[in-house]
Image: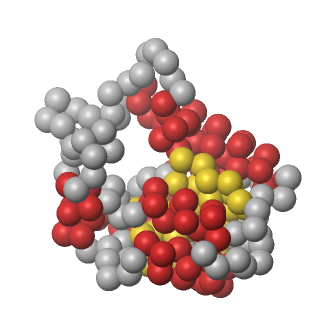
Amino acid sequence: MTDVGTLAGTLLITGTPGAGKTTVTQMVAERLPRAARLDADVFGMMLVSGWANMLDAEGNWNPGPEGRQQLRLRMVNVCSTADNFAEAGYTPVIDQVVETRQELAFIAGRLRVRPLMLVVLCPPLEVARHRNATRSVEARVDYDFPPLARNQQRELGDLGWWLDSGELTAEETADLIVAEAAKRAVVTEDQLQA
């Protein structure tokens, strides 16, 4: 583990299932002297009852109105917690699937701490599929995610830092993010409005 200086702002790491978000966000947070890892899925699991199914009858990702409301609430809570950590001097490192420009704009609008740095882990889909397939059953995602990857590229392709981590180890990916995110991943308000 390399000890480095503080990474000012909020770091949001996204990508498809199997891209390496969980492992890499943990390693990035460990490499910073003061950091907190916020897994958006954990915030979703806080709901004890009334949880909405995010998949349709065919098993495709398709949250209905209640699902979208719950995803929105989850991000409100993630952003509030990220701001609390940042204001206390910790770099928030968020692990969250962000698919659309609208979702990213919502997150940016909720976060007070700047800059917002977006890193999209984008290994080749066959790598992400293999990683997903070799996970424990509890951690495995059971929907086909190439449509998510295509939509992320269409919606967010000109924002942040798209990092192909397919041939990198998780350690190499984390080291690269810590070293380069402040220069390569910042998303400005003007970019979001474009």
Question: Which quarter of the picture shows residue 163?
Answer: bottom left
The image position of residue 61, as x and y in percent, is: 28, 42
* Residue sticking out furthest to the left: 58
Judge whether 18 appears above or below 118 on screen: above
* Residue sticking out furthest to the top: 49
* Residue sticking out furthest to the front: 1
Q: Residue at x 26, y 61 (%)?
A: 131
The image's colouring method is secondary structure
Q: Is residue 60 visible?
A: yes
Judge whether 63 appears above or below 156 on screen: above
Location of the N terminus (image quadrant): bottom right
Question: Which quarter of the picture shows residue 125?
Answer: bottom left
Q: Residue at x 54, y 61 (%)?
A: 25
| Residue sitting nearer the eye, 119 or 48 | 48
Location of the C terminus (image quadrant): bottom right
| Residue sitting nearer the eye, 12 or 186 | 12
The image position of residue 53, as x and y in percent, is: 32, 27
Judge whether 48 appears above or below 89 on screen: above
The image position of residue 187, as x and y in percent, is: 62, 71
Q: Is residue 100 visible?
A: no
Question: Which quarter of the picture shows residue 35?
Answer: bottom right
Q: Residue at x 30, y 39 (%)?
A: 138
The image position of residue 165, as x and y in percent, is: 38, 77
